[in-house]
Image: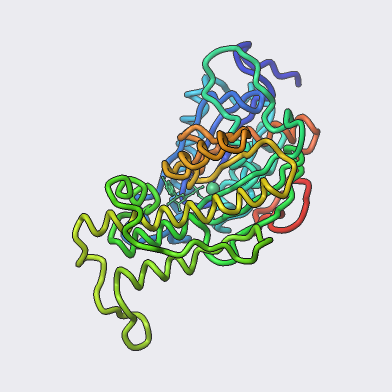
């Protein structure tokens, strides 16, 4: 059957699903970069009282929300299922129960409508988010990472991952560094718990840091070995914990005091000092990689790329080193399905489709070495 999408939509026209963690999301993207709709239902309300994501609650919430979210994405984009070229889904990495909801829903829809199915790696999709833009008319897309003349550097900073890549092409990435313990977003979330701020912690720390003195406390910036591109954030988290709460008592679960004893001023100073150290640890490794590899472009993605201090530092770095730094628009930093549908269009153009055996996986294929995704 020949599909004829409405003239105003770029092709391929793809509906994307994202359910890897605690956002239920669906989006319609054309030509890899034109975002016609981007619907995200967060579950923060459900997980807040636990201070983190509870996997069982997350998968049940995805089940309840996925169909309304898809309907909303289709309605906003002004398309029908018959207009689509493919259905894409983030099938790795993430929480297995959550991934299964999105993967099963995408497969069911693709099978019942006779559409192509495309599985996408969530982490690589965060880098594609740099190329997305809300559709405002008919200008052609730039094709995303396909236009990269030489390898770009890629930095993914999220709640589950902190990785540095060489992006040889949109579907050809090589991991050169990753966290050896906590992800940077996870460290922001833990810092927020220590300081008695809400969940998710990153935005709360970011906001409060603006009011504090970032030199008030000397917190450690991890560098690891002189040639290392890896990251480490657990030392920073522990240093903050001890400075705020004092020494552990007994087995280590109790401390001399807790964050509730802090004044507003003290809390803001800690937030600012923590943020400065966390961002510096990222910038140190980016500079190291730029010294080592011949590249003039840095792609950044993931929830922490919304951080105002990181964005300022990257702006300064772009000017100082005369390179192009591509950051996602704020609405595409956090988990979303537009990045899934966008990256899927590159697979579509390459004829890389999945069959009904596509399975969800907690692990990413891009965890080590150079891989085709
Ligand atoms: O990419 P993302 O939505 O989900 C994962 O794939 O993990 O990233 C979520 C993470 C959370 O840890 C959240 O606290 C952090 O991104 N985050 C921020 C900011 N906004 C979100 N961290 C620092 N500053 C922010 N403005
Ligand atoms: Zn993510």
Please tell me whether residue 273 is drawn above or below residue 36 in the rendered image: below
Q: Nearer the viewer, residue 352 or 142?
A: 142
Q: Is residue 165 left or right of residue 53?
A: right
Name the residue at 45% across, 55% down: 58
Looking at the image, the residue that sits furthest to the right is: 351
Q: Nearer the viewer, residue 305 or 8?
A: 305
Q: Nearer the viewer, residue 123 or 341?
A: 123
Coloring scheme used: rainbow
Label total for image:
0
> Residue 294 in the image: x percent, y percent?
75, 42
> Residue 228 in the image: x percent, y percent?
66, 61
Q: Quadrant of the N terminus?
A: top right
Please tell me whether residue 351 is drawn above or below residue 31 in the rendered image: below
Looking at the image, the residue that sits furthest to the front is: 320
> Residue 155 in the image: x percent, y percent?
60, 47
Q: Nearer the viewer, residue 277 or 367?
A: 277
Please tell me whether residue 7 is drawn above or below residue 64 in the rendered image: above
Name the residue at 62% across, 41% down: 125
Looking at the image, the residue that sits furthest to the bottom is: 250
Name the residue at 76% across, 31% down: 149
Name the residue at 48% across, 42% down: 313
Q: In this rendering, does residue 76 appear at all?
A: yes
> Residue 123 in the image: x percent, y percent?
62, 48
Snapshot quadrant of residue 83:
top right
Q: Is residue 245 left or right of residue 314?
A: left
Q: In this rendering, does residue 355 appear at all?
A: no
Q: Is residue 31 left or right of residue 349?
A: left
């Amino acid at each position: 059957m020949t599909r004829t999408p409405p003239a105003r939509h770029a092709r391929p026209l793809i509906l994307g699903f994202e359910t890897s963690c605690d956002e239920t999301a669906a989006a319609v993207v054309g030509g890899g970069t034109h975002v016609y709709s981007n619907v995200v239902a967060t579950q923060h309300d459900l997980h807040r009282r636990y201070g983190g994501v509870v996997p069982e609650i997350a998968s049940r919430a995805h089940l309840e929300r996925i169909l309304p979210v898809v309907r909303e994405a289709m309605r906003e984009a002004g398309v029908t299922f018959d207009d689509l070229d493919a259905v894409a889904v983030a099938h790795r990495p993430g929480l297995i129960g959550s991934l299964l909801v999105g993967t099963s829903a995408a497969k069911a829809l693709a099978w019942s409508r006779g559409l192509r199915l495309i599985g996408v790696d969530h982490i690589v999709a965060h880098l594609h988010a740099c190329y997305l833009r809300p559709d405002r008319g008919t200008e052609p897309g730039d094709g995303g990472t396909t236009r990269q003349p030489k390898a770009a550097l890629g930095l993914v900073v999220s709640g589950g991952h902190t990785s540095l890549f060489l992006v040889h092409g949109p579907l050809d990435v090589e991991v050169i560094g990753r966290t050896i313990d906590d992800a940077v977003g996870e460290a922001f979330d833990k810092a927020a718990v220590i300081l008695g701020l809400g969940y998710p912690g990153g935005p709360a720390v970011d906001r409060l840091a603006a009011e504090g003195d970032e030199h008030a406390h000397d917190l450690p910036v991890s560098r690891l070995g002189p040639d290392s591109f890896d990251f480490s954030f657990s030392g920073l988290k522990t240093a903050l914990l001890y400075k705020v709460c004092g020494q552990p008592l007994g087995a280590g679960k109790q401390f001399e005091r807790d964050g509730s004893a802090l004044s507003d001023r003290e809390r803001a100073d800690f937030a600012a000092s923590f943020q400065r150290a966390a961002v510096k640890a990222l910038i140190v490794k980016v500079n190291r990689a730029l010294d080592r590899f011949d590249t003039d472009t840095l792609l950044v993605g993931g929830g922490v790329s919304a951080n105002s201090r990181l964005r300022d530092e990257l702006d300064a770095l772009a000017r100082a080193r005369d390179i192009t730094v591509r950051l996602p628009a704020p609405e595409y930093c956090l988990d979303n399905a537009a990045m899934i549908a966008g990256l899927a269009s590159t697979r579509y153009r390459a004829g890389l489709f999945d069959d009904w055996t596509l399975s969800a996986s907690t692990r990413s294929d891009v965890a080590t070495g150079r891989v085709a995704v």
